[in-house]
Amino acid sequence: MYEFDKIEEITESLKQYVNTNYEIIKLEATERTSVIGSSFVSGLIVGLTAFLFVFTLSIGMGFYLSALLGDSYSGFVIIAAFYFALAIVILIVRKRFIETPLRDKIIRKILEKKDI
């Protein structure tokens, strides 16, 4: 009977150990997800703010160049051509300067260990 009690005690300890490890893994996954999610949202807010700044600046530059050139559309055509050229450059270098660093940053965030 003594051995049966020991086996039952060991089994119960093992169940508690497995449940505790499961809870730890769940908490770590939740923490990493929340860190990545908050980084994404804050990046989205900064990106949206930068977009609005550049958008407003572009409209202002379009009006300024149009006034400088003497018609109502040339400035906007020049600004559009600039953004088209910028889009071509970004399309060409996107893997090296955008996709790879972004992927590496996401992987580092996921695998980041916290010192306790």
Image: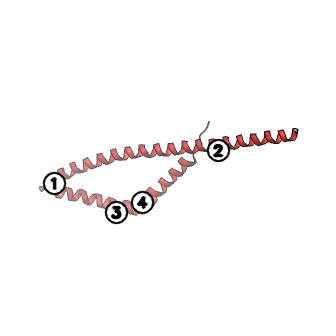
Which residue carries the number 3 mark? 88
Q: What's the CA distance linking mark 1 and mark 3?
A: 24 Å
**Earlier-in-chain disc, 4 versus 3:** 3
Give the percent coordinates (x, y) of residue 97.
Answer: 44, 57
Q: Which mark is residue 41?
A: none
Q: State the residue in front, 4 or 93.
A: 4
Q: Nearer the viewer, mark 2 or mark 1?
A: 2
Q: What amino acid type should be assigned to the residue bearing mark 2?
A: Tyr
> Could you tell me which secondary element the residue under label 2 belongs to?
helix
Q: State the residue in front, 70 or 56.
A: 56
> Could you tell me which secondary element the residue under label 4 belongs to?
helix
**Earlier-in-chain disc, 4 versus 1:** 1
Image height of 69 relative to 26, above or below = below
Q: What amino acid type should be assigned to the residue bearing mark 4?
A: Arg
Q: Residue at x 54, y 44 (%)?
A: 32
Q: What's the CA distance linking mark 4 and mark 3?
A: 10 Å
Q: Badges 4 and 3: C-beta atoms under 8 Å apart?
A: no
Q: What's the CA distance linking mark 2 and mark 4?
A: 39 Å
Q: Residue at x 80, y 41 (%)?
A: 8
Which residue carries the number 4 mark? 94
Determine the image quadrant of residue 94: bottom left
Q: What amino acid type should be assigned to the residue bearing mark 3?
A: Ile
Q: Which mark is residue 66?
A: 1
Q: What amino acid type should be assigned to the residue bearing mark 1?
A: Ser
Q: Residue at x 57, y 45 (%)?
A: 29
Task: Determine whether, in the image, residue 96 is placed left or right of residue 67.
Answer: right
Task: Determine whether, in the image, residue 38 is placed left or right of residue 80.
Answer: right
Q: Residue at x 44, y 56 (%)?
A: 98
Give the percent coordinates (x, y) of residue 15.
Answer: 72, 43
**Earlier-in-chain disc, 2 versus 1:** 2
